[in-house]
Image (cartoon, helix red, strand yellow):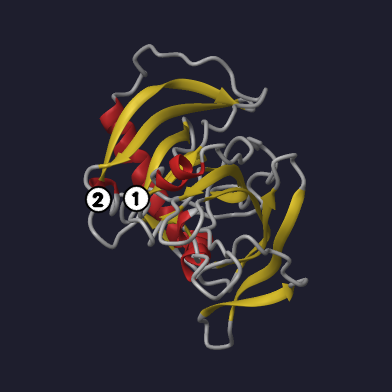
Amino acid sequence: MLRTLRNLPGTGRVLVVLALMGMVCAGAAFGSDKKKHDEKAASVSYTPMPLDSGYGPMDITDPPTPPEEIIREFTAKESVFREALNHYTYRRAVRVQTITDDGKVDGEYYEVDDVIFDPSGKRTEKVVLAPANSLERISMSPADFQDIQQRLPFVLTKEDVGQYDLKYVGRQTVDQVPCYVFDVAPKELVKGKRYFEGKIWVDAEALQIVVTSGKNVPDDLRKGHEDLSTPFTTYREQVDGENWFPTYTKGDGVLHFTGGNGYLGQDVRVRQTIKYTDYKQFGSTVKILYNGQEVENDPSAKKPDDKKPK
């Protein structure tokens, strides 16, 4: 999430700390009435990420399989996927930009990391490329990096599904991949925990999530302590012939921070992309279990690009 550092007395400058994550819409604009702007509550402006030409019409008729059974099946497969992902290395490229009112980039954070295993088998990250950070209106916080590492590649497993309400929306084809679509929302917001809220597209054959579009919640809207995040869309592709792995996250949103006590309110537009590439299985003795039985995981069984929503 993103937080704002205020224009405190004697500092002579305003820093805004934003939380990385999510995305969507429009340019930032300040109201002509300063007092009204300063008193406006902290919030995030966004519209749902637009669906590209790869999305077909929505079929809202009842699915051939009861939604409750679909949920049981795909959350079990998501548990398998999360275990499989724990045995892969990959490269992650993160780009975060602030955008001016006229659409120009006025600051950028960019870093490329290899997510690998050290000699003891512990997962770690190695910085491959990190140009000078030119962000001035925002800065990256530890929560931002936690979002990148843990929450943007949203996985809804059988262990976690009890925390959410899922509502079946319909069937829709995404780049020729038939999918079930569900609305997802947390049942309750437990203090200190973060949740996903939005839509997921589940491959009707593989029964894994292939697209996630929504927002991590809750935001901290307390005046002077705002910690906000923007919406995001994450796409997956078949990488090993069996599992759908995250390959691309995008988003764009405007964060509104309140003013008061000698500092001005701030509206900052943030745009972000994350690319995940070079997936490689670590070791050769990994066994993946599904319903108590070993799942064959042969990378040569299918070509990685057999199915690929974009």
Compared to 47, does 299 lie above or below? Answer: below
Amino acid type, label 1: Pro
Foreground of the two, 30 or 203: 30
The residue sitting at 39% across, 58% down in the picture is 289
31 lies left or right of 131: left
Q: Position of residue 260 (x, y in %)?
A: 42, 56
Determine contact: label 1, label 2, CB under 8 Å.
yes
Q: Position of residue 132 (x, y in %)?
A: 76, 72
The residue sitting at 59% across, 54% down in the picture is 298
Q: Position of residue 150 (x, y in %)?
A: 46, 61
Disc on the earlier residue, 1 or 2: 2
Foreground of the two, 310 or 81: 310
Within 10 Å of disc 2 (Cα), the crowding (few <14, some 14-19, many 20+) is few
Question: Residue 89's image quarter?
Answer: bottom right
Q: What residue is pinned by disc 2?
A: 189
Q: Position of residue 261 (x, y in %)?
A: 41, 61
Q: CA distance from mark 1 to mark 2?
A: 7 Å
Compared to 261, does 117 lie above or below? Answer: below
Question: Residue 192's image quarter?
Answer: bottom left
Q: Which mark is residue 83?
A: none
User: What is the quadrant of the C terminus in the image?
Assistant: top right
Whether residue 208 is visible, yes or no, is no
Single out the residue that lies furthest toward the bottom. 120
Foreground of the two, 187 or 298: 187
Amino acid type, label 2: Leu
Whether residue 310 is visible, yes or no, is yes
Q: What residue is pinned by disc 1?
A: 218
Within 10 Å of disc 1 (Cα), the crowding (few <14, some 14-19, many 20+) is many
The residue sitting at 51% across, 63% down in the picture is 144
Compared to 69, does 53 lie above or below? Answer: above
Compared to 2, does 307 lie above or below? Answer: above
How many labels sit on residues?
A: 2
